[in-house]
Image (cartoon, rainbow, N blue to C red):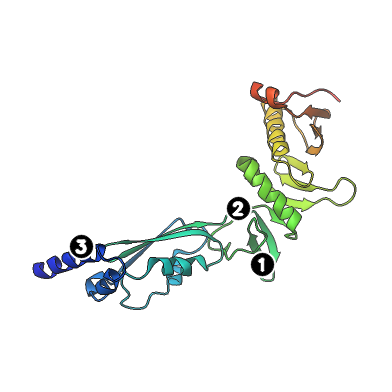
Amino acid sequence: MRTGRVAIAAAVALAGASPWWGPLLLRRFAFFEVRRIEVVGARYLAPAEIAGSLGLRSGASVWTDLRDLERRVASLGGIVSVRVSRHLPATLRVEVTEMEPVAMAAGPSGMVAVGADGRPLPYDPASAPVDAPVVERASPPLIAALAAVESADPALFGLVSAARGIAGAGGGVALELDGGRLLLGLPVDPAVVRAMAAVRRDLASRDRSWQELDGRYRGWVVVRGGARAAPARMARPAARRRGRAKARSA
């Protein structure tokens, strides 16, 4: 047994010095048959599904071409990046980054998670709950708006329960929160998103109620509902350093 392990160790050392044919030699040793697959980073896809996408046959070796395995996993929908590594003697480690859903839309068989690119994601909400705004229809402008809000202020995006497009004069999108509604113009300006979040925090710090924040007016966030309506001036760069946007009575 000890002699066999020494021989294997010598073979590994030799393979390291011979990159192209070394793995071919080591695949012949049963000692390197895959006995364990570790999946790291999966939140929405089932680890068993990711492991199965490797397409390994019985008796497969950890010395299988890792780039080929990565291509197989990447073919799964919802995978942004993948890295497969070997941990000798018999473990493959699969590290994935999944695409975060920005919406939940109605599909042929129920609710479907939708990515920032507007395409459906193969996530099963029944087994891996998806926390994303509900939309009636995943139109490109609406999905792009939600992706922009998530990028500009993830904390604010996390509070959005539903979203819809606004028809008629002004247009834009309406985002529903537990405490009110946010109105944004298209395309969504990240600076406006951050300004609306700042106004929302300012109102909360002063215990001011509100029903709607409208950011479709250039340089202003209009506050509607509550005790009285007031337009809040969007902070300029100098004002932003002082901490918050100022408001005045309507």
Q: Residue at x 73, y 51 (%)?
A: 163
**Above/below status of 228 relative to 129:** above
The residue carrying pointer 2 sits among few (fewer than 14), some (14 to 19) or many (20 or more) residues within 10 Å by Cα, namely some
The reply to whether discs 1 and 3 touch (Cβ–Cβ < 8 Å) is no
Q: Position of residue 190 (x, y in %)?
A: 69, 40
> In the rendered structure, which amino acid carries the disc numbered 1?
Gly
**Above/below status of 169 relative to 218:** below
Q: Residue furthest bottom?
A: 58
**Above/below status of 246 relative to 56:** above
The residue carrying pointer 3 sits among few (fewer than 14), some (14 to 19) or many (20 or more) residues within 10 Å by Cα, namely few
Q: Position of residue 120 (x, y in %)?
A: 64, 64
> In the rendered structure, which amino acid carries the disc numbered 3?
Ala
Quarter of the picture containing the C terminus is: top right
Q: Earlier in the sequence, mark 1 or mark 3?
A: 3
Which residue position holds label 2? 131
Marker disc for residue 13: 3
Q: Earlier in the sequence, mark 1 or mark 2?
A: 1
Q: Position of residue 234 (x, y in %)?
A: 75, 29
Which residue position holds label 1? 110
Q: Residue furthest right?
A: 169
> In the rendered structure, which amino acid carries the disc numbered 2?
Asp
Q: Nearer the viewer, residue 106 or 193?
A: 193
Disc 3 from disc 2: Cα separation: 48 Å
Q: Residue at x 66, y 55 (%)?
A: 103
The residue carrying pointer 1 sits among few (fewer than 14), some (14 to 19) or many (20 or more) residues within 10 Å by Cα, namely few
